Image: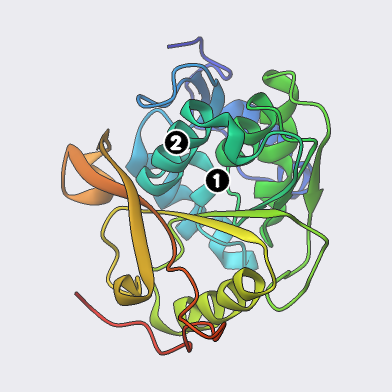
Amino acid sequence: MGHRAGDGRRHAVTPRVIAYPAAFIRLETRLLSPPLVPEITLHLAEESLPIWQRTEEELGEIGLAPPFWAFAWAGGQALARYILDHPETVRGKRVLDFASGSGLVGIAARKAGAAHVACADIDPFAHAAIALNAALNAADAVTVLTTDVIGTRGGWEVVLAGDIAYERDLATRVFAWLETLHAEGVQVWIGDPGRSYLPRDRLEKVAEYAVPVSRELEDAEIKATSVWRPRPERAGGAATSPRSGHAP
């Protein structure tokens, strides 16, 4: 499973550490392999609550986001597993890993033969985590996009998105964008463990996995997690119209 990147003590969150997110990540994580994707090693939180509480209490005071980058979420694990098992999905293609977090899905795409991978996230700590994890896995041709890419067209041939349907307004915005890309010929693949705002009626399920997760984060030890893609266009070439996300 890996070795400790830090020494296990509680380190003070100083302005110096905040200025150097990579140092914070090395101190507060271990090198671990996600259960469903043992081929990849990441800087991950060994325990969920301590790092989450610390970022909420200390880093949150200066407006930093919760440490989503410190966990291998179920949707990302399922999507990474699918890509590694079906490398033809990304082989030789330009790929976007949207809301990348740790970079798990993007790293899997590069290992599966993607020509180039862009990992997009708006959290500066995720930027550092992606860079560290890509280097750790010898995943070259992986770049980090630091701006909000929703609504943009970056020349990608494949867009991968894990765990993006947990908040209504965000899900509505993201899925409208993904459907636009899909209508333009971009392949879109989504990993989701049953989040409330996944628009299932506009998607088709292509795979399902039982993903080991932290009970502290998910209130479960195993999450049934699926890989989805937009449904084929309707007869006559009209794409499915975007609608708001809905609870199951």
* Quadrant of res 247: bottom left
Residue 86 appears left or right of 14: left
Label 2 with label 1: CB-CB less than 8 Å? no
Q: Which residue is mark 2?
A: 82
Q: Residue at x 35, y 70 (%)?
A: 198
Q: Nearer the viewer, mark 2 or mark 1?
A: 2
Q: Residue at x 55, y 82 (%)?
A: 176
| Mark 1 nearby-residue class (10 Å; few <14, some 14–19, many ≥20) | many
Residue 34: mark in rendering: none
Q: Identify the secondary structure beneath mark 2.
A: helix
Q: Is residue 241 above or below residue 13?
A: below
Question: Does any portion of residue 12 appear in the rendered image?
Answer: no
User: Along the line of sight, which residue is nearer the eye, 61 or 206?
Assistant: 206
Question: Looking at numbered disc 2 in the image, what kind of residue is underneath it?
Answer: Tyr
User: Along the line of sight, which residue is nearer the eye, 165 or 19?
Assistant: 165
Residue 69: mark in rendering: 1
